[in-house]
Image (tube, rainbow, N blue to C red):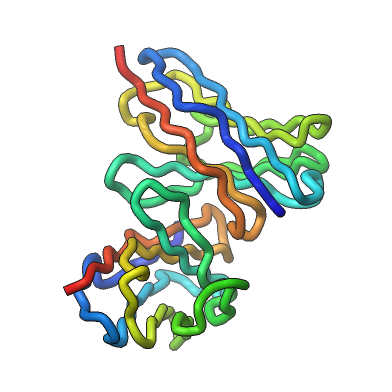
Amino acid sequence: QVQLQQSGAELVKPGSSVKISCKASGYTFTSYDMHWIKQQPGNGLEWIGWIYPGNGNTKYNQKFNGKATLTADKSSSTAYMQLSSLTSEDSAVYFCATGSFDYWGQGVMVTVSS
Amino acid sequence: DIQMTQSPSSLSASLGDRVTITCRASQDIGNYLSWFQQKPGKSPRLMIYGATNLEDGVPSRFSGSRSGSDYSLTISSLESEDTAIYYCLQYDKYPRTFGGGTKLELK
């Protein structure tokens, strides 16, 4: 069965960076896009971008250009998202989801606080 | 960016009621629309894709339809387990955009 296992919650300081992971199993990792989605507390969903692990191609929401960097490691079937220059506005839950948004990770809560 | 205007933002209904939630797209997106259900503390769950196609395992009381630029999610007979927030998503154009959500509660 398809599973996306995300890394644990992060408490990070303003101005720093964080890298969160999404380990895929139960399907061919290199054959499907992996999306990343942001959800701020009490708010809706915002699409950050996707990566195609087969060749590393990426597509970003312009709003997250310079903020999010998506990578993937084929050897471990793991997708990563690095968030940089963190501010309070980046405090949110971040989800990964497979290409048709049919499978989702459990989410990672990132809290930016001094 | 394509705006997905979802209505209502909240809805209170009784068990057995027929419930309809709507998303209006600001541009043509064809049938590239999905619906998700999200319960507190959980990840979103895909319910409908391609505007009208029921995802495997989703109860048949859920259905999706389209009329022009208006897309609807209907629950034919509300059950208690259906209380959640529902979101639409357009996946025709970049960036992908979600509706603002509809919080469905029991009356």
Q: How many marks?
A: 0
Image vertical order of residue A6 relative to residue A114, above or below: below
Residue A78, located in which quarter of the rendered image?
top right
Looking at the picture, tell me which residue is in the foreground, B81 or A78: B81
Image vertical order of residue A35 relative to residue B33, above or below: above
In which quadrant will I find the C terminus of chain B?
bottom left
In which quadrant will I find the N terminus of chain B?
bottom left
Horizontal side of A107 relative to A102 (left or right) equals left
Residue A51, image x, y percentages? 68, 42
Residue at x 21% of width, y 78% of height: B13
Image vertical order of residue A83 relative to residue A35, above or below: above
Answer yes or no: is residue B3 visible.
no
Residue B47, image x, y percentages? 51, 69
Horizontal side of B19 relative to B27 (left or right) equals left
Residue at x 31% of width, y 25% of height: A88
Residue at x 58% of width, y 42% of height: A60
Residue A52, image x, y percentages? 73, 44
Answer yes or no: is residue B105 visible.
yes
Residue at x 44% of width, y 19% of height: A85
Residue A95, image x, y percentages? 51, 42
Looking at the picture, tell me which residue is in the foreground, A101 or B81: B81
